[in-house]
Image (cartoon, rainbow, N blue to C red):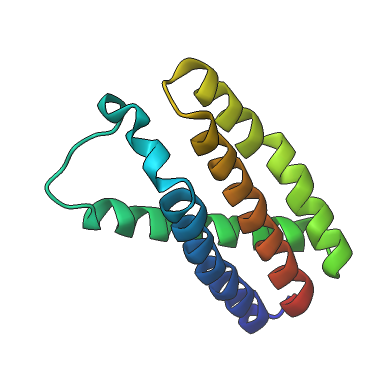
């Protein structure tokens, strides 16, 4: 395994994850987050939360690249296939279950689910390109 390619793929997927997080979980349907304001924690600043979410996005990208290397995933099609399987395995069911038990506007659940799909697809494309 080429560690430089691994690091570049992780970096590219992490940056892509940051942008998808911003768009799908911050911009898209933003007004719908206020449908149930009592659900969200109120803090003086969002900066520490944003920093933690960004860091976790890079950790998730590294985990995805590790899975690609471990399972011998090569190429765009296989990277996207792993992304789809990973999405069906964890983020989609968790988001749906959260929406069933926590007061979330349905469009918030949709945007979060789509955000995870795009994030994982971007990681799959980065893996196919650089690994």
Quadrant location, the N terminus:
bottom right
Q: Left or right: 74 with respect to 16?
A: right
Q: Examine the image and state in which quarter residue 96 appears.
A: top right
Give the total number of marks visible in the rendering. 0
- Residue at image position (61%, 57%) is 119
In the rendered image, the residue lying farthest to the left is 44
Q: Left or right: 111 with respect to 32?
A: right
Q: Examine the image and state in which quarter residue 71 appears.
A: bottom right
Depicted 124 relative to depicted 15: above or below: above
Q: Left or right: 9 with respect to 21?
A: right
- Residue at image position (71%, 44%) is 86
Evaluate whether residue 34 shows in this view. yes
At which x and y percent is residue 72? 84, 62
In the rendered image, the residue lying farthest to the bottom is 4
- In the foreground, 80 or 74: 80
At which x and y percent is residue 93? 64, 29
At which x and y percent is residue 10? 58, 70
Depicted 44 relative to depicted 35: above or below: below
Evaluate whether residue 72 shows in this view. no
Quadrant location, the C terminus:
bottom right
- In the foreground, 41 or 27: 27
At which x and y percent is residue 24? 51, 52
- Residue at image position (66%, 63%) is 123
- Residue at image position (67%, 64%) is 122
């Amino acid at each position: 395994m080429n560690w430089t390619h691994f690091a570049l793929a992780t970096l590219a997927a992490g940056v892509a994850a940051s942008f998808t997080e911003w768009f799908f979980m911050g911009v898209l349907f933003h007004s719908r987050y206020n449908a149930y304001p009592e659900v969200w924690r109120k803090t003086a600043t969002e900066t520490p939360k944003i920093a933690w979410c960004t860091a976790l996005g890079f950790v998730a990208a590294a985990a995805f690249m590790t899975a690609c290397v471990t399972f011998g995933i090569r190429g765009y099609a296989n990277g996207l296939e792993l992304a789809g399987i990973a999405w069906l395995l964890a983020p989609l069911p968790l988001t749906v279950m959260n929406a069933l038990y926590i007061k979330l506007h349905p469009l918030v659940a949709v945007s979060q689910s789509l955000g995870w799909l795009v994030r994982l697809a971007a990681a799959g494309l980065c893996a196919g390109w650089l690994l």
